[in-house]
Amino acid sequence: MGLLDRLTRGLTRTAERLAGRFDDIVGRADAPGQETAALDVDTIEALEESLLAADVGLGATTRLVAAVSQRPRTGTGLRAALTDEIRGIFDGVRPPDQKVSSPHVVLVVGVNGTGKTTTVGKLAHRFRQNGQQTLICAADTFRAAAVDQLQVWASRAGVDIVRAGEGADAAAVVFDALSAAKARGVDTVLVDTAGRLHTRVNLMAELDKIRRITAREVPGAPHEVLLVLDATVGQNGLVQAREFAAAAGVTGVVLTKLDGTAKGGIAIAIAHDLGLPILYVGVGEGIDDLLPFDAGAYADALFRPSW
Ligand code: GDP
């Protein structure tokens, strides 16, 4: 199956939630005599409700509805106008082009349970398949089980892992991993960071310490800070995201578990409200179930006709 088909399949539940209501809206816009009229109040309200139900969020919903409600349109025109506007939201938050640096250091941050460990494994697999020598650094030293899990993913992906004993200093493990990466000529280092400490202040302080070590050891590092967010959490994830974005200098989001939720509209809210690009989406538990995010395909999949 191609990437676009897999993204479409991952968005099935969200698209179904939208479609149930949206077909009705499109039907109204297509009703005889409507083609010369702006959308009526009931139709606009129905559109708002459908977007909110898919967790698009208030800010982005307001923008989308404002953009499509004034001009007269047919149902097909309405669909096209919405997908264009959604593409516009994602286009506004494109990540800057990466300068090539070696090793390229990627910090992976996020709360436990979001799929962070799985995502690090999937990313390692992906990078390796693209011909990059990749090293995983297990810097979540508070969860021995998570480090073991990460080790399993590293061997599945066929990449090396640098780990330390439970309770070791995370920054020291990062230092060791970066030294090993430089000595071995590694292209990409993926650093799995803690997702929970005794307090949030401790967690953010630890991330800051890891940032400082990487910056000291590798010029320009960390080159990317990826925040892993669980799509099934919907709008509540935005609170987490804001906190990490402020403290950890997040450069992009990996949105996991898109396959298990009807709240896939959250991707639009992340881009609109947080100004962060979505770089990858998780659509399953397997090592290949991580797709590079494609805004056009995403928008088309959301509003694909259900007939
Ligand atoms: P962590 O605590 O953040 O490191 O989370 P894990 O990587 O251990 O993942 C938590 C659970 O979510 C596991 O059961 C994973 O298999 C599952 N998971 C992770 N990503 C995805 C995804 O994209 N889709 C689905 N359906 N499950 C996922």
Image (tube, helix red, strand yellow):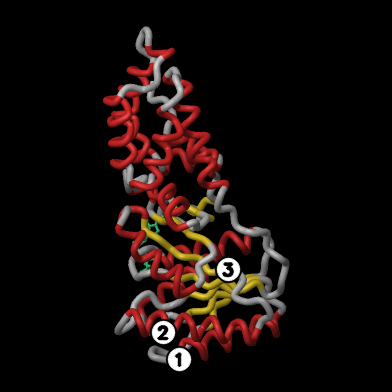
At a point 69% along the width and 83% down the height, the residue shown is 182
- Disc 3 secondary structure class: strand
Amino acid type of disc 2? Thr
Mark 2 and mark 3: Cα distance apart in space: 21 Å
Residue 180 sits in quarter: bottom right
Tell me, yes or no, whether the two marked residues, 1 and 2, touch with CB atoms within 8 Å.
Answer: yes
Residue 285 in the image: state x and y as whole percent: 40, 56
Is residue 1 in view?
A: no
Residue 169's tag is 1
In this view, the residue farthest toward the top is 32
- Residue 220 drawn above or below residue 130: below
Amino acid type of disc 3? Glu
Which is nearer the N-term, disc 2 or disc 3?
Answer: 2
- Disc 1 secondary structure class: loop
**How many residues crowd mark 1 within 10 Å: few (<14), some (14–19), many (20+)?**
some
- Residue 232 drawn above or below residue 68: below
Whether the residue carrying mark 1 lies under 8 Å from ligand 1 is answered with no
Observer-nearest residue: 85 or 225? 85
Residue 184 in the image: state x and y as whole percent: 70, 81
Observer-nearest residue: 300 or 77? 77
Residue 109 in the image: state x and y as whole percent: 45, 71
- According to the picture, the residue beneath numbered tag 3 turns out to be 224
- According to the picture, the residue beneath numbered tag 2 turns out to be 141
Residue 306's tag is none
Tell me, yes or no, whether the two marked residues, 3 and 1, touch with CB atoms within 8 Å.
Answer: no
Which is nearer the N-term, disc 3 or disc 1?
Answer: 1
